Image (tube, grey):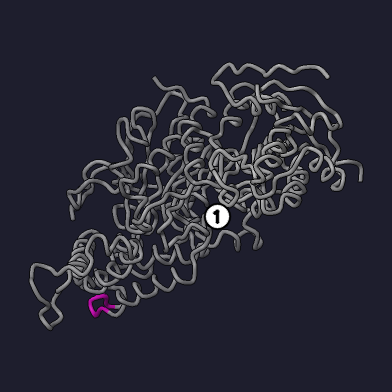
Amino acid sequence: MPAELPGHHVVLGTPNKLKLDCGIELGPFTVAYQTYGTLNAERSNVILVCHALTGDQYCAGIHPVTGKPGWWELMIGPGRVLDTERYFVICANVLGGCMGTTGPKEIDPQTGVAFGLSFPVITIGDMVRAQALLLDHLGIQQLFCVLGGSMGGMQVLDWAARFPKRVFAAVPIATAERHSAQNIAFHEVGRQAIMADPDWCGGDYLAQGRNPTRGLAVARMAAHITYLSEAALTRKFGRNLQERDAVTYGFDADFQVESYLRHQGSTFVERFDANSYLYITRAMDYFDMAAEHGGVLANAFRGTPVRFCVISFSSDWLFPSWESRTIVHALNAVVANVSYAEIQTDKGHDAFLLDEPEFHTTLRGFLDGAAEHRGLRFR
Amino acid sequence: MNDVKTPASPTRAIRPDLALIAEMIAPASRVLDVGCGDGALLDHLWRTKNVDGRGLEIRQDRVRACVAHGLSVIQGDAETDLRDYPSEAFDYAVLGQTLQAMRNPREVLLQLARIGGRTIVSILNYGNWRIRWRLLTSGRMPVQDSGARHWYDTDNIHPCTLHDFVRLCDELGLKIERGLLVRGTGTARDLHSPGWYANMFGEQGIFLLTRGKQ
């Protein structure tokens, strides 16, 4: 991994530290972010993109570490849905991440060694507050739109609830207002895989010059299954064998699906930090908006001026459509301005990253409508 | 009874009955359009009357079309999802030509009246002479549904006549503030208490309802 990653870096949380939900005050800390497009004179064309668990700020263009297109390259660019000729798109690596924003792999200035497990446990709310500090730094008062899928969608919901006046439109995609028991369970499997790897060294692997890549790869493999669907796996791989005519009566990757998962695991460990994976999955597990608002989700949005567009995917079993409907019902209960569409697809949770024309058309239309209501003019 | 002209739309032409509904709605009001279809009414209201409109539509393809058109529409079922909304959340709750397709039209009408300060309902009049004549002469159930050809595949599972509808409003304590009788040509005329003539010759009725004094 390059020592100095390209893009913007800003030091925040100084002189006033950021008070985290766990009670610890963090600061100074670094936020690494990317921007695409041009900020208009009124500073009214800003779209904040919130990335998912294993995403990062390099959402468009070529990723400096992987050399592959950014995770939302399909969506962001001139003439694309997030049209960089119209909008100024910002995407920041989340707090606790491992692409330049302060997280467990960064050096703790007080000790001179990597934070490791001494890094405080962070929440979705902490990530959002850090992003708000970034916007303060950039002199941006209000976002035209905040959007994101999965954990990005959790941040979107938190943004809308926490800073309703700073958000004109919000698009939570393939997400939920709280992490379900099943999803916490999957995350726990991933964390245990990491922690069971002897190279994890109780979280101290960086200081000891080791890396729990086997554990992290297994965590990624297990998680990756949850991002797909049975139908998509069958369509893509079926029971096809991997470069062989018959099964080998062994534990090599006989099936294409095994080879695919192993590949997902091995490429993931090249760009992701195991402790970051622990911290970020924990942040998702702790997310429960209703609990934060007296047990009534609608309370989070009472009197909200935000225009919402909730989007889910029919074959997503990680964040099923009914969880999006729960959000919609709460927004209806406070007569919020909300649109909701379920996109028909067999691609599962990952559909939000893929070429889904219905999804793109719906989102483009929503943004056009919101821009008209916001009074944004484009040349 | 005075003839009421269908208001001309400055943007795109909308169905005559929708134009008549739009005409009943005050500018800059808040409207929930239940069964909003492709969003033609909501779009018209936003462009011509600066109305803050929301839609509820059961069909996914129509919802996506609405959202892609910049309208605030959610996918949902009126029979279950109207309960989410608080009372008097909107100035108007609109139900255009969908009451007859509800499993429980009485409950839906009550919910609409609860949510909207006023309720606008348009209904197909099954008391129309053509329908009576078809039933009388053929002895087979007439189907008033463009998407269906037989009694068993029509969405219109609860047909009613203008008289039936007025009786239901009475029973629910809903006052008919205004009624319009729509003929096939799209022309309409005012009616306050639909008599036998309206019930025999009207193809559609559009009613503006308020909750009576309880």
Residue A148 appears left or right of A59? right
- A329, A92: nearer the viewer: A329
Q: Is residue A237 above or below residue A308?
A: below
Q: Residue A102, image x and y in percent?
A: 35, 56
Find numbered disc 1 in the image and state the secondary structure of the residue it sits on: helix
Q: Looking at this rendering, what residue extends furthest in the right direction?
A: B214
Q: Residue B24, image x and y in percent?
A: 74, 26
Q: Is residue B105 above or below residue B176?
A: below
- B171, A181: nearer the viewer: B171
Q: Amino acid at mark 1?
A: Arg
Residue that label 1 marks: A325
Q: Quadrant of the N terminus of chain A?
A: bottom left
Q: Residue A323, image x and y in percent?
A: 52, 59
Q: Is any part of residue A163 visible from this angle?
A: no
The residue located at (69%, 44%) in the rendering is: B99
**Quarter-of-image position of residue A48:** top left
Q: Is any part of residue B9 visible from this angle?
A: yes
Q: How many marks?
A: 1
Q: Is residue A273 above or below residue A247?
A: above
**Quarter-of-image position of residue A59:** top left
Q: Is residue A231 above or below residue A100?
A: below
The residue located at (30%, 57%) in the rendering is: A98
The chain identifier of the residue carrying mark 1 reads A
Q: Which residues are magenta?
A: A197-201
- A142, A345: nearer the viewer: A345
Q: Looking at this rendering, what residue extends furthest in the left direction?
A: A244
Q: Residue B98, image x and y in percent?
A: 65, 42
- B69, A14: nearer the viewer: B69
B12 in the magenta segment: no
Residue B19 appears left or right of A81? right
Q: Main secondary structure of the magenta part?
A: helix
